[in-house]
Structure formats: C-alpha cells, structure tokens
Amino acid sequence: MPSADDLAIARYARMRWNTPLSESHAALLLQRLDIPAGAHVMDLGCGWGELLLRAVGADGTGSRTGTGVDTDDAALARGRALAANRSLDKQVTFLKQEAAAWRERAERVMCIGASHAFGGTREALRALADLVQPGGRLLFGEGFWERPPTKEATEILGAEIMPLADLVEHARSLGWRVLHLSTADQREWDDFESTWLAGRQEWLLHHPEDPRAAGLRDELDARLREYVGVYRGVLGLAYFVLGR
C-alpha cells in the first residue's frame, strides 16, 4: 500500500503555482512590479514560493533577497528544495509563520490569493499598507465576481467577494494607487483547475484499489462539477500592482 505521504505530495505535484497564472502573465507582473537591484521581496502566503524565487533570481546579479511566509510545512519544504536547486537558498528564506503576524517592511511585497490570512480583502489591503516601504510596491492577487454569482456560487466561495469595480474602488479608498491591473483569462483558470486536480487524478489511476481511492474520487469529481457547473466564468482573479 502507498505511504501516507504520497497522496499529500500528489496534491500539488502538477502545479507551477497555486493561482491561475500563465508563464507570460507572470513575467508581465514581475516586470510591472519593477524590482530594483538589491531589493528585498516579501511573499506573504507564499506556498512554495515559485513566483518569489523568480522575482529574486530574475536579474541574475545575486543582489536581490526574499522571504516567503506560510503555514504549510509541505509547501515550505518544497520551496526550500526549489531554492536549493536553483542556488537561491542563500538569497531566499522560507519561514513558517502566520502572514497576519508579519511586521517587517520590504521594498516589494507580494500577496496572491492569501487575503483570507488577514481576515479578508479589506483587512489585507489595510495590513499590507504597513508592510510596504515608502515608494515600494505591492503585487496583490484577489478573487472577484466576473458576473453576478448564483446562490450556490456564493455558498461555495463566500459572500465577501466583490465585483472588480468595487475591488478597485476599495483599494483606492485605502490610499493605494493602481499601477497595473490584469485578470486571469479562461485558459489560465482551466489550467489552474486542471492541474489542481491532476496530481491526484494520476494517483487514482495508479492506485485504484487503495482504501482512500473511493473518497478521493468523490472529492475530485465534486470539485470538477462545481467548477464547470457553478463558478467557471463567474469567479475571476485580478492581479494588481499597487503603490502608495
């Protein structure tokens, strides 16, 4: 029988990062973040920190540094291994800590899909304002309603999600200037949802008789039904580069 850890490893095995984002879109966001030489980059709710590693390593000078903060032990271990494989382990540190408890400022801060760690969108934008150094920038990724949600979508995803126009106005009301705005397209969403499932779908194909297989099969089928039947084309993801 497979070990208890193999299924946990399979969960994110096919994912580049835990957000709907293409390679070209990621490159655009890092360009708009405009990270200067010698800057420190902070990623709150970093997961395994793929975008953080690219942000630090992109200039090739070794002058940038970064810190990734998360509470997921497996994700942090993956991030440390990726950093070591790319010879970035002297420049990037991964720490287990609640994002909302972080107090050190940085020239560039990233928080993508992790506003829940602060208590929601509004609370995150307020808290992150204290973590970006004067003249710095924040890369903020947040969900929004592409179109009015059904009752089922609201029950699954939460009533606190805003339309994009409201999200923009809320950021502006807190003193942020929107330096860049782009949204995940449908292909990015489809790839994200597919890769989120793919590692465990492959696990099922290789372990159909495992005692965990039936429950996992039901879980994955339910997620796919929810995506294609409830929130595909309804839930969006916006990426902001914000300054103050």
Image (cartoon, rainbow, N blue to C red):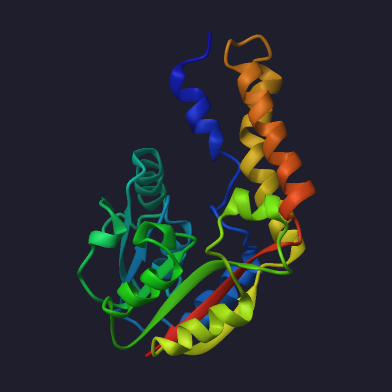
The one nearer the camera, 68 or 131, is: 131
**Residue 207, image x and y in percent?**
64, 15
The answer to whether 67 appears left or right of 158 in the picture is: left
Q: In this view, does 205 lie above or below 211?
A: below
- Find residue 148 and report its image quarter: bottom right
Q: Is residue 50 above or below residue 110?
A: above
- Find residue 165 and report its image quarter: bottom right
The number of numbered discs placed on residues in the rendered structure image is: 0
Q: Is residue 143 above or below residue 242?
A: above
The one nearer the camera, 107 or 147, is: 147
Q: Which residue appears farthest toward the right when viewing the image?
A: 229
Residue drawn at x 53%, y 67% is 142
The answer to whether 103 appears left or right of 184 in the picture is: left
Residue drawn at x 62%, y 62% is 21
Which quadrant would the C terminus be assigned to in this image? bottom left
The answer to whether 126 appears left or right of 241 in the picture is: left
**Residue 191, image x and y in percent?**
71, 52
Q: Which residue appears farthest toward the front when viewing the image?
A: 151
Residue drawn at x 56%, y 56% is 158
**Residue 4, image x and y in percent?**
45, 19
**Residue 226, image x and y in percent?**
72, 44
Residue drawn at x 70%, y 57% is 189
